[in-house]
Image (cartoon, helix red, strand yellow):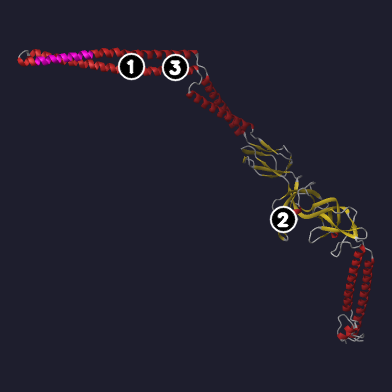
């Protein structure tokens, strides 16, 4: 045989070996399949008590739970000495910084001394306002009242004396008027006689002179009367003045006999009291500031100094952060839980935390905070919505550091000692939405409504409707009906298995036919003669050679 014939024989040999091997495989598989079909499988299961545990996974970062910010004390201070450095371990009560307060102390002490003196002077003023008048001063005031009353009496007497003086002067006026009338008549008579020669010129001139003198005396008498009227009016004003003097003297005596008897004294006294109260308040404030003067600041917690925020010589106020101290034994883990798992979260849920970088280490904790709002988080897969949570660390150690990443397993469901069945045992009615199972009495099945609770991928909680130990159908398919027997279920299962086996055989025949070219009809269709060189091979074809 030439080289091409040898190659054809080799191909036939390989095909024969392949066909034989496949036939053996198919025989074994069919045999095993029939064996499985014939083997009795349990169709029911007992209602049992189990623990139902569901968990979700996430990753998180370790953080300090509480980094304390140490604030400067006092309204304004100057940092004199910083007594610690970053990384130092401190205890509660340890001094952290000292302040330069000498100038402030001296200023407060001076303000206290000055205010105390002002208070003393003001108290003396108040005391003088309320001190009783001495007997000597009272006697002097009484004498003044008596003197003023005597002056008033004299003024009244003087005023009253002008009535008789005016009356006398009025009489003098009246007499002067009569003298004027008499003198003027004498002039008139002599003037007529002089005209007829009954009187001399000297007599007439003497009469005229006498008349003029009478008029002068009348004018003097009238002027004297007017002067008396003026004096009387002045005397009346003197009475008013004397009355006022008496009133003033009497009031002065009364005020001296009564403490703070007048409105002005009362007002002045009250104003002085307010001044005293303000000084006393100022003194209290100065003393309080002196007592509260801060010379140093101490740590309130045990921990480690994580940051020194000021330098020596820095001016500080009450809101100035000077140091940060943290307790590295109090750690938390910050994580973001996907929005699909977030509804399962509750405060207090237990968490187990591990890390590939911390081999053999397992930390435990619980959820202490769940954020009220979801946030957008960036991951390797892109952007997703997640809810931030915080988790306590129950067993921190020197190995676990802030900034480490941990893998988290959060137990979102842990229900011990509950009745459960396989998830496949429970079906739900599409119309009513009620759940049911098929209960077995050993032979026959009866449909029973149940109330379910929590579930996972394999089992489901039975809240009511079943008792522990009852047998239920493990897999309740849609073909199961109320009243069927276990034999019906088993027969139905066998029929399904046989159909599957028949389908498997058809697939195997097709595979064998595809692998081996010894089907006469197939070979005829391909134009290949039965047997001989160039016969059946992988894929058929024309004779070779």
Specify start and end residues of the magenta stretch as a single range. Answer: 172-191
x, y percent for residue 196: 5, 15
- Label 3 neighbour load within 10 Å: few <14, some 14-19, many 20+: some
Number of the label disc, if any, that sits on residue 250: 3
Q: Is tag 2's residue or tag 3's residue first in the polypeptide sequence?
A: 3
Q: Main secondary structure of the magenta part?
A: helix
Q: Residue at x 69, y 52 (%)?
A: 373
Q: Is residue 276 above or below residue 203?
A: below
Which quadrant is home to the C terminus?
bottom right
Q: Is residue 141 visible?
A: yes
Which quadrant is home to the N terminus?
bottom right
x, y percent for residue 208: 12, 15
x, y percent for residue 17: 93, 77
Tell me which corner region of the image, top left, top right, bottom left or bottom right, holds residue 422. bottom right
Residue that numbered label 1 is attached to = 235
SS state under label 1? helix
Q: Is residue 439 left or right of residue 339?
A: right
Residue that numbered label 2 is attached to = 386
Front one among 351 and 148: 148
């Amino acid at each position: 045989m030439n080289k091409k014939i040898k190659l054809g024989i080799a191909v036939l040999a390989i095909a024969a070996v392949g066909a034989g091997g496949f036939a053996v495989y198919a025989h074994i598989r069919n045999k095993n399949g029939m064996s499985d079909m014939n083997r009795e499988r349990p169709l029911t299961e007992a209602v049992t008590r189990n623990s139902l545990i569901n968990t979700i996974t996430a990753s998180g970062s370790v953080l300090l739970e509480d980094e304390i910010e140490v604030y400067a004390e006092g309204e304004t201070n100057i940092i004199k000495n910083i007594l610690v450095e970053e990384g130092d371990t401190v205890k509660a009560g340890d001094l952290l910084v000292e302040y330069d307060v000498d100038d402030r102390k001296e200023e407060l002490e001076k303000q206290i001394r000055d205010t105390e003196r002002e208070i003393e002077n003001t108290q003396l003023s108040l005391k003088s306002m309320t001190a009783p008048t001495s007997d000597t001063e009272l006697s002097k005031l009484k004498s003044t009242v008596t003197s003023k009353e005597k002056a008033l009496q004299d003024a009244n007497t003087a005023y009253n004396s002008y009535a008789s003086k005016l009356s006398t002067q009025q009489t003098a006026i009246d007499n002067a008027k009569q003298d004027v009338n008499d003198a003027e008549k004498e002039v008139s008579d002599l003037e007529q006689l002089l005209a007829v020669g009954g009187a001399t010129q000297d007599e007439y001139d003497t009469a005229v002179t006498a008349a003029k003198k009478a008029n002068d005396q009348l004018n003097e008498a009238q002027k004297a009367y007017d002067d008396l009227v003026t004096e009387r009016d002045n005397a009346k004003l003197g009475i008013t003045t004397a009355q006022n003097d008496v009133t003033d003297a009497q009031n002065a005596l009364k005020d001296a006999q009564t403490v703070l008897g007048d409105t002005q004294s009362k007002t002045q006294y009250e104003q002085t009291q307010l001044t005293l109260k303000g000084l006393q308040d100022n003194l209290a404030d100065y003393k309080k500031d002196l007592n509260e003067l801060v010379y140093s600041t101490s740590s309130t917690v045990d921990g480690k100094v994580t940051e020194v925020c000021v330098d020596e010589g820095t001016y500080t106020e009450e809101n100035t952060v000077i140091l940060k101290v943290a307790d590295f034994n109090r750690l938390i883990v910050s994580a973001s839980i996907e929005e699909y798992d977030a509804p399962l979260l509750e405060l207090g849920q237990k968490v187990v935390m591990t890390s590939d970088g911390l081999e053999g280490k397992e930390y435990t904790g619980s959820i202490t905070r769940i954020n009220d709002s979801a946030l957008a988080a960036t991951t390797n897969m892109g952007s997703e919505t997640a809810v931030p949570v915080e988790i306590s660390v129950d067993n921190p150690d020197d190995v676990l550091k802030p900034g480490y990443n941990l893998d988290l397993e959060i137990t979102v469901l842990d229900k011990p000692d509950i009745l459960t069945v396989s998830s496949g045992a429970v079906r739900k009615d599409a119309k009513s939405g009620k759940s049911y199972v098929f209960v077995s009495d050993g032979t026959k099945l009866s449909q029973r409504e149940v109330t379910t609770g929590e579930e996972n991928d394999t089992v489901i909680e039975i809240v009511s409707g079943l008792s522990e130990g009852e047998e239920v159908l493990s897999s309740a398919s849609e073909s199961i009906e109320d009243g069927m027997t276990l034999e019906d279920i088993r027969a139905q299962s066998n029929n399904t298995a046989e159909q599957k086996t028949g389908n498997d055989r058809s697939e195997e025949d097709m595979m064998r036919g595809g692998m081996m070219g010894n089907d006469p009809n197939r070979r005829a269709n391909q134009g290949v003669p039965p047997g001989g060189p160039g016969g059946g091979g992988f894929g058929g074809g024309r004779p070779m050679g």
